[in-house]
Amino acid sequence: MRLEPIANPSALRRFGLPALALAATVIAASLLALIAGADPFATLGLILEGAAGSRFALLETLNRATPLIFTGLAVAVAFRAKLWNIGAEAQLYAGAIVTVVFGMTSWGVAWLQLPIIAALAVAAGALVLLGPVILKTRFGVDEVVTTLLLNFVMLLFVSYLVEGPMKDPAGMGWPKSVPVAKDLRLPRLIEGLRLHWGFGIALIAAVLVWLIETRTVLGYRMRAVGQNPQAARFAGIPVNRVLVQTALISGGLAALAGFSEVAGLKGHLSRDLSPGFGYTGIIVAMLALLNPLGVVLSALFVAGVFVGADSMSRAAGVPTYIADILLALSLLFMVLAISLTHRRVVWR
Amino acid sequence: MSQPEVLRLDRISKRFGALLANDDLSLALRAGEVVALLGENGAGKTTLMNVLFGQYVADGGTITAFGQPLPPGNPRAALAAGIGMVHQHFTLADHLTVLENILLGTRSLWSLSLDLRAARVRVVALADQFGLAVDPDARVGSLSVGERQRVEILKALYRDARILILDEPTAVLTPQEADALFATLRKMVADGLSVIFISHKLHEVMAIADRCLVLRHGKMVGDVATGHTSPDALAAMMVGGEVQRPKVAVGVAGPALMRLEAVTTPDREGAPGLKAATLSLHAGQITGIAGVSGNGQAALSDILSGLAAPASGRLLLGEAPAPARWTPAGALSAGVGRIPEDRHKTGTIADFTLTENAVLETHARAPFSRRGWMDWRAAADHARAIITKYDVRCPGPEARIRLLSGGNMQKLILGRVLEAAPGVILANQPVRGLDIGAIAYVHGQLLAARDRGAAVLLISEDLDEVMQLSDVIHVMSEGRLSPPLPRGAATMAELGLWMAGEGFDHAA
């Protein structure tokens, strides 16, 4: 077999293949459930029900999607410019640390203090990515390595903080930080529903990033640098400056995930604040083909699978790891579907 | 016509969407024959050869090689039948030696032995027989373009190719290298091999081919013996009418718009930098740079485009020195228009639309953007204007530029540059790989820009092109520039001596 390129794929190809990928994921998941000794239909039903079957489940999914939208956007923006930011996890924690530091004492004017904290968190996340990007543009250091390793540095730093200077004296020995002030918790998006404003901010961020990428000079330059840095440089685009600007946006977005988790959900900093939201953001961004609006949908999908699998696991006794396998498979099938959108297989 | 027929393509058709790239094409090739396949860009030459070589599956038609039908869509079958192809862009591994490249793919993946000695004997014998001098142990990465082409041909011969397809083989060669290639081809046909020679350089075709097949818009419009035709007749067949060649009048020199005074730049990646190069670009003149490629043309081009600043010496814009931080953006705002050497890698962004490519250099200015926001409607209008004015054949401004032929891509770049009304124009290999119609068009536009008062710097490996268009010629050799030679002051032979590096010692 060989692959032949298709210049203009048909609509059937462009929408049918991803749908097929989804179907293949479902079938694969059924087989996994079967292997685990459960009824596949019941298992899938339970996942679906756990993700969206009730108001509680749906809100849980939306809450879980919130940090994933932020990290997904962070990765999507960076990858668009071929800046391989694998460090959204570190930038998330930078945002979380700043949120606790500036949020543990209330100034009594929450409407002013919260935006300031958010801005400082963004700045912190941007700063964390600034180092690797300067090493890249000045000395050609591979940012995959530096951003990835910074994740571990940051996690150890968080451990130090929550065991040491920021430890909550009232925490009964648990390694967690002092809480943020009561009045600085993000308000609910809709009164009476357990969904905080972080989700709203995430949606706004997605639209803003989409506007930046498609409508602004910076977005055009980011795409140009990502597609062909040589041509971009020749055309007078300051490639290194664009990369730095991209890094600032990307790091800032990831930090908002930390801000939103602390101020909206947990109320304090701990080592398990993020169960790998930074890494999962890569899956979210790839599934969305780096499209900022697509990131919202793929974050909802990924969050739904996690939340649904948790609930299914409690009910059916199938290990919750099925969620990770499901996501991995869906990504593989989706990448395959995307690759086949622009190529046709020729059997001879 | 006593020679047996070795290859027959019968009623081949291939459609890409709405485009009928090959429309019912038939072709027969005899042993010991050189057939030239002529046609403008997009006429269907490359598609037909890709069908023959199994890269594409034809929608209709059959292929017979040496009396046996060839299964469609199988490059291995074509290879096994004795058909070899040398692509325009070589398919060699830079880090392997010549011998390893030739052997690549000839052995089973699981075979444990690699009989290099026997292979080397055979490669050396083939090289001797056909005059393809190349060191079998040299790394391909260290070879010149001409040598790499010889490796490609050896690779095909090593696999017992009896039919050799050469796609634009002389596009990358110096005149001397092209002559050597022709000598090889003559030895091959004397030995009974057959050659399909794809080109649009008509004087070469007249020199090497026995027969010419002419394609236009996917159809076969001519099949003539070379002895019974002329370059003009072939050109008319290719474009479907008389070819308008631009008339070159002498330019009227105005003031110097850009000057290099003893500019030196460092060598890099084996290519020489400039060595105390002095050059004046005058309004209303085309200044031609002749020379074998790789003699500092890239360094000169980098200075004009703003990619490099002089390490020593001075760069003057009019009477004022160029800004100390000399960048591509600076060059653009100083009114330098740049047509880069590589339109695929440097001139355009393949997956960007025509609109996005049309504003690559001007996107940060009104009307294409205001306060950081793009105005895509203004950009699309601009692209549409270029498409109309410069006759860019394309599906529309929202099409990706990678779908365009080289000629149409170049027309878009030309439009992008000329619409900015530059005072100085750098044209680095502006017609490389283009067909007759596109070449005449690009040359006409450069002459028109000159007549409007622009100072044009034309860098080309094609001595004919330089001599035809230039009002003043400098010859480049190892980073040095000869003194200016006015139009008609030097013969081709004299320019050749400068190109070989003679005369510089007296001048310096």
Image: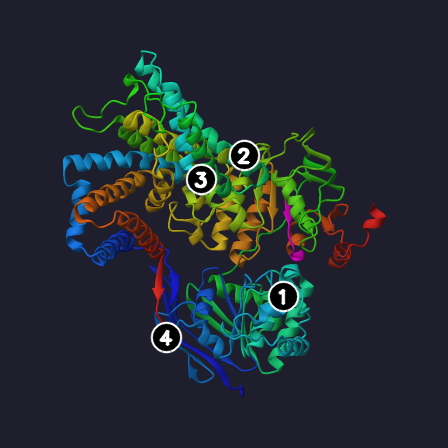
Q: Secondary structure at mark 3?
A: loop
B458 drawn magenta: yes
Q: Secondary structure at mark 1?
A: loop
The answer to which quarter of the image holds residue B48 is: bottom left
Residue B111: percent from left, percent from top: 52, 75
Q: Amino acid at mark 2?
A: Ile
Q: Which residue shows up at 76% across the image and 42% down it?
A: B276
Q: How is the image coloured?
A: rainbow
Q: Chain of mark 4?
A: B
Magenta segment boundaries in residue numbering? B457-464
Q: Nearer the viewer, residue B22 or A69?
A: A69
User: Which badge, 3 or 2, is on the more N-terminal residue?
Assistant: 3
Asked if badges 2 and 1 are on one and the same chain, I answer no
Q: Secondary structure at mark 4?
A: strand
Instruction: Specify the farthest residue to the right.
Output: B506
Instruction: Specify the farthest residue to the front.
Output: A173
Instruction: Indicate which disc residue A134 carries.
Output: 2
The answer to whether one can see residue B14 in this image is yes
Asked if badges 1 and 4 are on one and the same chain, I answer yes
Circles 1 and 3 in contact, beta carbons < 8 Å: no
Q: Nearer the viewer, mark 1 or mark 3?
A: 3
Residue designated by label 4 = B61
Q: Dot 3: within a 10 Å radius of its alpha carbon, few (fewer than 14), some, or many (20 or more) residues?
A: many
Residue designated by label 3 = A85
Residue designated by label 1 = B97
Cα separation between marks 4 and 2: 58 Å
Cα separation between marks 1 and 3: 37 Å
Q: Dot 1: within a 10 Å radius of its alpha carbon, few (fewer than 14), some, or many (20 or more) residues?
A: many
Residue A93: percent from left, percent from top: 40, 31
